[in-house]
Image (cartoon, rainbow, N blue to C red):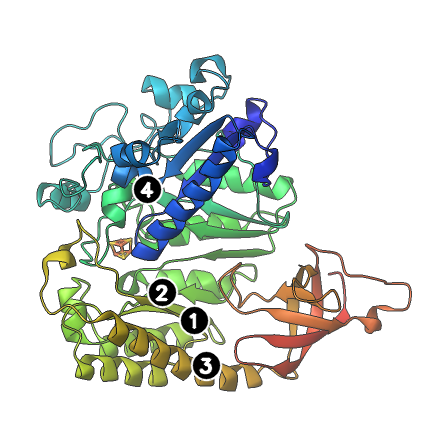
Amino acid sequence: MGLLDRAGARLTSHPEEAEILIVNTCSFIDTAKQESVDTILEMARFKTSGSAKRLIVAGCLVERYRDEIQKSIPEVDAVVGTGELESILEAAGLARPQAIAVPGLFNILSGSGQAESRPGKESQAGTHKANQPAFRAEGDLREQQGRFRRDDWQGATHMLPTYLYDESTPRFLTTPKSSAYIKIAEGCDHPCTFCVIPNLRGKFRSRRFESVVAEARQLVARGVQEITLIGQDTTCYGEDLGLKDGLATLLDALASIEGLRWLRFLYAYPNRITNRLLDTIAKHDNICKYLDVPLQHASPAVLKTMKRGAGADIFLKTLEKVRAAVPGIALRTSFIVGFPGESLLDFELLQAFIQEARFDWLGVFNYSDEEGSGAFSLDAKIPKRTIEARKRRLMKLQQSISKRAKQQWVGRELVVLAEGESEETPLLWEGRTQFHAPEIDGKVYINDFAELGPSVATLEPGRFYKAQITEAHEYDVVARIVSGPL
Ligand code: SF4
């Protein structure tokens, strides 16, 4: 979007107004593929009706079904994979990339710049080319073992994406003006057998440390006050750059940026939560006391087949360590139900673990049988209705855990970021505390700000207030503003 904006395109989220339609897709599980295809078909109608001239499909679906998309949906004019972002301009017919002055992108296209400025390192698979990132030895080894193979995907190219953006890549923010995401790394070298993300996104590679810090500074200068760091595995950050405790060091540097109120990272890998990382979260006031650690399961047998290892006992110790190091921390996780061979006993173990672990936020995914994943060839597939029933049971269990936990919040005074009027009713405002990550966790509904005085008719979106929690529901809480903006 940043590239298109810089090239002179006027962006709109109303397809009926657009000349060029771009569908950014996802394809890591069945429901994501379905949603992507449905959206492409919906947009294709604007092209057939003549209101739009061009339809482009971008993102992960392209990495997987590159040829298939255009063959099956002839309205599609061009596809842009995750490793060729800069070709969006050509695809849109706006300009050839060479004609657009976008520093940094030239560098990537011509094979100099960002990739060369990374520490030189010989890959185990052979000397890496000048315009390729230096991957971790683990990634190179996994590649040799076939981890990233796309042979099963008809129409996919064999080239894995190697792209990384940098601080000079233009960005167009679609998040509320106070919040932004920063991707600090791309790809993943883990061998999880249910997951095709490494096949889609390629080997793990980190953005340069200075580039992330520079981007964060730019965002804060633009008014961003909350930054969420993302990547397929944020806790691996910097390993390919030769950094020890890369994520903790990065958090230290970012936390010192003046004006940055909230900083958090998502998607920690469980066995990479180091003491140094926890100490870093604990010591900075502006690092949110929040940890998202997807555990996927709790039964050692299932986790072993998933090639993730560990189990309930080890996880409970990890959670204990986290809670001791960062008192009051909010914990989020996600699980997969219905992985091939998941017995009733495995499932009961997972339930018992959830009961004991008391997560603040929890997501449950149904196992999706993906061609190209290690688990695809496993026998003992679980019927869909059993998977659905297991998911419902876990969600019900978490509902009661969450309700009890949220009741403990009543009476507490917390800093809340006001986000805007509620989508449900203009009588309520919505906000978040540091214990809620953007978009995924519950909400704080604000129903009273009379304390701010008779002259205050409304709250200001993107500003922080002190609020007292007055009611708790299953996932959401209600609050009244006591002072602010802070
Ligand atoms: S760590 Fe996450 S992205 Fe990487 S293979 Fe495992 S589930 Fe997939």
Q: Quadrant of ligand 1?
A: bottom left
Residue ID at (30%, 51%): 28
Label 1, label 3: how many angstroms apart (C-alpha)?
15 Å
Label 4, label 1: how many angstroms apart (C-alpha)?
31 Å
Label 1, label 2: how many angstroms apart (C-alpha)?
7 Å
Q: Amino acid at mark 4?
A: Leu
**In this figure, which residue is indicated by the disc labeled 4?**
61
In terms of secondary structure, where does tag 2 sit?
loop
**In this figure, which residue is indicated by the disc labeled 1?**
331
Q: Nearer the viewer, mark 4 or mark 1?
A: 4
> Is 440 positioned to the left or the right of 414 in the image?
left
**In this figure, which residue is indicated by the disc labeled 2?**
293
Residues tagged 1 and 2 counted as in contact (Cβ below 8 A): yes
In terms of secondary structure, where does tag 3 sit?
helix
Dot 1: within a 10 Å radius of its alpha carbon, few (fewer than 14), some, or many (20 or more) residues?
many
In terms of secondary structure, where does tag 4 sit?
helix
Decide: is 405 above or below 69.
below
Label 2, label 4: how many angstroms apart (C-alpha)?
26 Å
Q: Amino acid at mark 2?
A: Val
Q: Earlier in the sequence, mark 4 or mark 1?
A: 4
Question: Residue 201 location, x and y as percent?
Answer: 29, 42
Q: Nearer the viewer, mark 2 or mark 3?
A: 3
**CB at disc 4 and ligand 1 closer than 8 Å:** no
Dot 2: within a 10 Å radius of its alpha carbon, few (fewer than 14), some, or many (20 or more) residues?
some
Decide: is 238 above or below 300.
above
**In this figure, which residue is indicated by the disc labeled 3?**
399
Q: Earlier in the sequence, mark 2 or mark 3?
A: 2
Q: Amino acid at mark 3?
A: Gln
> Is 217 positioned to the left or the right of 253 in the image?
right
